[in-house]
Amino acid sequence: MNIYGEILIENWRNPKNYKKVSKPTHSAEVYNPLCGDKIKIEVKIRSDEIVDIGFRGGGCIISQAAASLLTQEVRKLKNVKRVKNLTERKVFELIGTEIRTARRKCALLPLEVLRKALK
């Protein structure tokens, strides 16, 4: 049995928005020393609209795929206020498979970084 869902595997193999943003207006980076996951998110905002977002880093399938999925959602929402209202529950919905308690930190790391960047 595969513990990772198809959505996670696809976004890990072919991450969307894995890039450096040209002239970002906001950025943040978080490193989890317990597991080695590291994510940096860069955002370019103009007039309360997110016009570009990218992430870089390394780590487990869950953290990297979650970053890909989260940045895709941010691109859809665009409005900074709406993006700031993204919840942990929404991240788990985007992932589309159950994440064990021990791995929830991995899945939520990108949201933590995004929130830090938008402060």
Image (tube, rainbow, N blue to C red):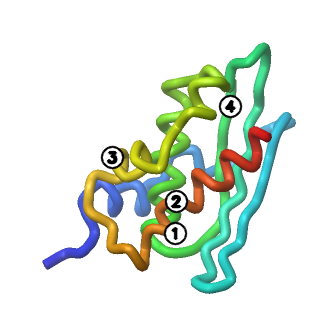
Name the spot of residue 66 as percent of width and height, x first.
47, 56
Mark 4 secondary-structure assignment: strand
The residue depicted at 27 percent of the width and 63 percent of the height is: 98
Nearer to the camera, 12 or 90? 90
Quadrant in the picture for the N terminus: bottom left
State the residue position of label 3: 93
Q: Which amino acid does label 4 sit on?
A: Asp
Name the spot of residue 63 as percent of width and height, x first.
51, 65
Q: Residue 108 carries which label?
A: 2
- In primary-sequence order, the first of circles 3 and 2 is 3
Disc 3 to disc 2: CB gap under 8 Å: no
Disc 2 to disc 1: CB gap under 8 Å: yes
Distance of label 3 from label 4 (alpha carbons): 23 Å
Disc 1 to disc 4: CB gap under 8 Å: no
Mark 1 secondary-structure assignment: helix
Mark 2 secondary-structure assignment: helix
Q: Residues within 10 Å of mark 2 (few under 14, many from 20)?
A: many
How many discs appear?
4
Q: Locate residue 84 relative to residue 101 in the image: left or right.
A: right
